[in-house]
Image (cartoon, rainbow, N blue to C red):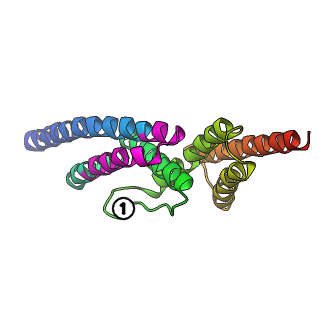
Amino acid sequence: MKNLLKQSLAALTAYKMSASQLKKISDDIRVTAKNAIALVRRGSIDAAEPAMQTAEKLLHDAAELIKKEPGLGWEGFYAEAVEEYVEAKTFCAALSKKALALPDSLHIDPEHIIGGIADATGELVRKAITDAFAEPIARIEEYRAIVREAVESLSAQSLSGKLRGKYDEAERNLKKLEEVVYDLRLREKK
């Protein structure tokens, strides 16, 4: 019993040390991704690219830790950081009209991808509202089409728990975009 307890305590200590490192990396990923989102929202897609590269380097660092301690991949702080990265990557891709591509080498679970893409629909709503008077309505309709495609893809799945909440939020975001387009169309007719 004594040896088993000693081994278990050593394993727990090692896990906690790795978790502490991953928490710091995850915080940096989240901050960097939020910075990229803010830059893109202000129309600085090119300026967001270095932030996205930094986030990807940090994700590689996280992947190395997770290789050693696989359970770390399910820590909440890591999941939040990955979702924020996917949200930023999706938002950048949508506004630059590029295909969304995530590096294969990153440890990104499908749930994190789904959550990040669903969260990006909210950023598209914010961008549409900001752009409503500065951009042609066709641009706002592009945002709506992107969100509609995401909602349709998500609706084909039987989502539950946290992902169901993200799907519901994406549906609300689509409704908001439809209202923005409707209001803009009404103003055009006046």
Counting labels gives 1
> Which residue occupies the extreme right position in the image?
190
> Which residue occupies the extreme left position in the image?
3
Dot 1 falls on a residue whose secondary structure is loop
Relative depth, front residue between 83 and 48: 48
Give coordinates of residue 80: x percent, y percent.
43, 40
Is 58 part of what is drawn in magenta? Answer: yes
Q: Residue at x 14, y 39 (%)?
A: 5
- Is the N terminus in the top left, top right, bottom left or bottom right quadrant? top left
Relative depth, front residue between 40 and 170: 40
Give coordinates of residue 92: x percent, y percent.
49, 50
Give coordinates of residue 95: x percent, y percent.
55, 52
Instruction: Report whether 24 appears left or right of 10.
Output: right
Magenta region, residue range: 36-60
Instruction: Report whether 104 appears left or right of 45.
Output: left
Give coordinates of residue 61: x percent, y percent.
23, 49
- Is the C terminus in the top left, top right, bottom left or bottom right quadrant? top right
Q: Residue at x 86, y 43 (%)?
A: 188
Q: Residues within 10 Å of mark 1 (few under 14, many from 20)?
A: few
Instruction: Report whether 134 appears left or right of 35.
Output: right
Relative depth, front residue between 139 and 74: 139
Relative depth, front residue between 162 and 136: 136
Instruction: Report whether 69 appears left or right of 117.
Output: left
Q: Is residue 59 above or below residue 184?
A: below
| Residue linked to disc 1 | 103
Is 116 part of what is drawn in magenta? Answer: no
Q: Residue at x 35, y 44 (%)?
A: 51
Snapshot quadrant of residue 182: top right
Of helix, strand and loop, which mostly describes the magenta segment? helix
Q: Amino acid at mark 1?
A: Pro
